[in-house]
Image (tube, rainbow, N blue to C red):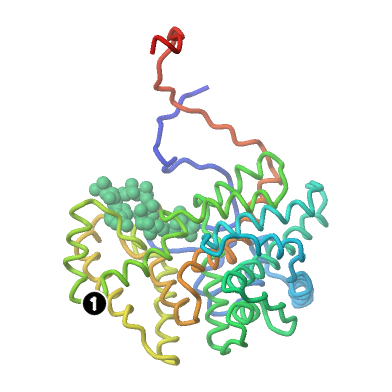
């Protein structure tokens, strides 16, 4: 066997063959099954895009209606899951609550019939349908309220905002939220998707696959950055403070949240669309003082580190969009997970089609032949 050079973070090493999505990081292009995200964001819906990613083709009208109906009829969560979530500490992070709840779902459906397309479809529908209900339920229960029941007459995005805010959302906000889900649903071999594929490769159940991916998404170097961006903007607090703040952080070699990407060396195309969505919301519902601060951060970062290929990523403007919809800061990453679950499931399905367990190697840099030292001689 040829020994490859060790690459920290597996940079540039292909971990799978995949036809689900494609990124050109130099040109700022992202495609799902060959279709540009700009086109999907303008014309598709989250559930149609999820179908495209998972089953590899755009659904016919009948297929889409069936899929939407199936999702709508599986939105409720079991009372035992809800009761379990009630016992979670309200100070706990909603990503931890989501990870535990997604894993707990597997307790009810532990049969692993991985070669059966009906089992696969049921798991896909159940996970896509219930994850938003879990996120909204934890939010209401930690405030001491009962969760709101899902509404079958509302579409996927509108129903989530309804369950979260306990009132029917404005149609523009609901459409923009749906576009956000499209933008976050899939992104090649990112860390959480890799985690999902590694877990899938052991032939465990899809609930464990999603739970492991949720755990991976939560970190601040990955999906958790969207929450930290808003905290950073709040800390900066005024446009005048941006330059000294960035100067100080960059000098200390600290990372500026929402900037940089392993693959993109230009502005993330999703950040451009999210910025535009934020402006649409500000037009209708009033501006946000943090937007001017964010623009100044982008301007100065481009001046200082743009030449190193460091530009805004998907997490930089998403929080400003979610804030306008009344979504609390610590729910930004669970919202990312609501979308990304469909991408993880597309990779789960693809992994099963040509599975081989992930078992890479390591470069051992420890010692050999060391004698055991008795405890009283150490
Ligand atoms: C997501 O992979 C995906 O596709 C992920 C994602 C998806 O949809 O799934 O796109 C979602 O996770 C977006 C990324 C969210 N994370 C952040 O915003 C956190 C801040 N960004 C970084 O920590 C960083 O840019 C990463 C984690 C995104 C990428 O890390 P890499 O590829 O390992 O890059 P690196 O840390 O090795 O940095 C390379 C250089 C360094 O400078 P030098 O030492 O070479 O001089 O770039 C600098 C870094 O210091 N750098 C930054 C920076 N990001 C990189 N400097 C300041 N601020 C930053 N944010």
In the rendered image of this protein, does residue 334 appear above or below residue 262?
below
Q: Which residue is more in the foreground, 371 or 1?
A: 371
Alpha-carbon neighbours of circle 1 within 10 Å: few (<14), some, or many (≥20)? some
Residue at point 61%, 60% (across, down): 88
* Residue 102 in which image quadrant: bottom right
In the rendered image of this protein, does residue 112 appear above or below residue 287?
above
Q: Secondary structure at mark 1?
A: loop
- Image coordinates for residue 290, horizontal then vertical, percent: 32, 78
In the rendered image of this protein, does residue 48 appear above or below residue 106?
below
Q: Which residue is more in the foreground, 316 or 58?
A: 316
Q: Is residue 182 visible?
A: yes
Which image quarter holds the C terminus? top left
In the rendered image of this protein, does residue 337 appear above or below residue 144?
above
Q: Is residue 271 left or right of residue 293?
A: right
Residue at point 39%, 9% (across, down): 377
Q: Which residue is more in the foreground, 271 or 154?
A: 154
* Residue 309 in which image quadrant: bottom left
- Image coordinates for residue 261, horizontal then vertical, percent: 38, 56
Q: Is residue 247 left or right of residue 360?
A: left
* Residue 363 in which image quadrant: top left
Q: Is residue 106 left or right of residue 261?
A: right
**Mark 1 beta carbon near ligand 1 (under 8 Å):** no
Residue at point 44%, 29% (across, down): 4
Q: How many marks?
A: 1
Reading the image, the residue beneath label 1 is 238
- Image coordinates for residue 214, horizontal then vertical, percent: 57, 55
Q: Is residue 23 visible?
A: no
- Image coordinates for residue 63, horizontal then vertical, percent: 77, 72
């Amino acid at each position: 066997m040829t020994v490859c050079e060790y690459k920290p973070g597996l940079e540039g090493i292909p971990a799978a063959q995949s036809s689900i999505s494609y990124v050109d990081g130099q040109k700022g292009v992202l495609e799902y099954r060959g279709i540009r995200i700009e086109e999907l964001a303008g014309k598709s819906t989250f559930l149609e895009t999820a179908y495209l990613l998972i089953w590899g083709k755009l659904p016919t009208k009948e297929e889409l209606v069936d899929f939407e109906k199936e999702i709508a009829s599986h939105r409720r969560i079991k009372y035992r899951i809800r009761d379990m979530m009630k016992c979670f500490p309200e100070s706990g992070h909603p990503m931890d609550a989501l990870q535990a709840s997604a894993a707990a779902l597997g307790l009810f459906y532990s049969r692993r019939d991985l070669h059966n397309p009906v089992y696969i479809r049921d798991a896909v529908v159940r996970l896509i349908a219930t994850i938003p209900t879990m996120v909204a339920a934890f939010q209401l229960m930690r405030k001491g309220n009962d969760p709101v029941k899902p509404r079958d007459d509302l579409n996927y995005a509108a129903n989530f905002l309804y369950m979260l805010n306990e009132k029917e959302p404005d149609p523009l906000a609901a459409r923009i939220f749906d576009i956000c889900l499209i933008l976050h649903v899939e992104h090649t071999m990112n860390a959480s998707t890799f985690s999902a594929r590694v877990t899938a490769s052991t032939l465990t159940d899809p609930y464990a696959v999603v739970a492991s991916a949720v755990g991976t998404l939560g970190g601040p170097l990955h999906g958790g950055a969207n929450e930290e961006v808003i905290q950073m903007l709040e800390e900066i607090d005024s446009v005048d403070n941006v330059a000294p703040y960035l100067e100080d952080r960059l000098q200390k070699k600290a990372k500026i949240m929402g900037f940089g990407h392993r693959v993109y060396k230009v502005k993330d195309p999703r950040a451009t669309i999210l910025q535009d969505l934020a402006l649409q919301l500000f037009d209708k519902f009033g501006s946000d003082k943090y937007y001017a601060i964010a623009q100044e951060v982008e301007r100065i970062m481009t001046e200082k580190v743009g030449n190193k290929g460091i530009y805004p990523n998907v997490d930089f403007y998403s929080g400003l969009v979610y804030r306008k919809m009344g979504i609390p800061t610590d729910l930004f990453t669970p919202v990312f997970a609501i979308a990304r679950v469909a991408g993880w499931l597309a990779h789960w399905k693809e992994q099963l089609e040509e599975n081989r367990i992930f078992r890479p190697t390591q470069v051992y840099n420890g010692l050999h032949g060391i004698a055991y030292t008795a405890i009283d001689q150490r």
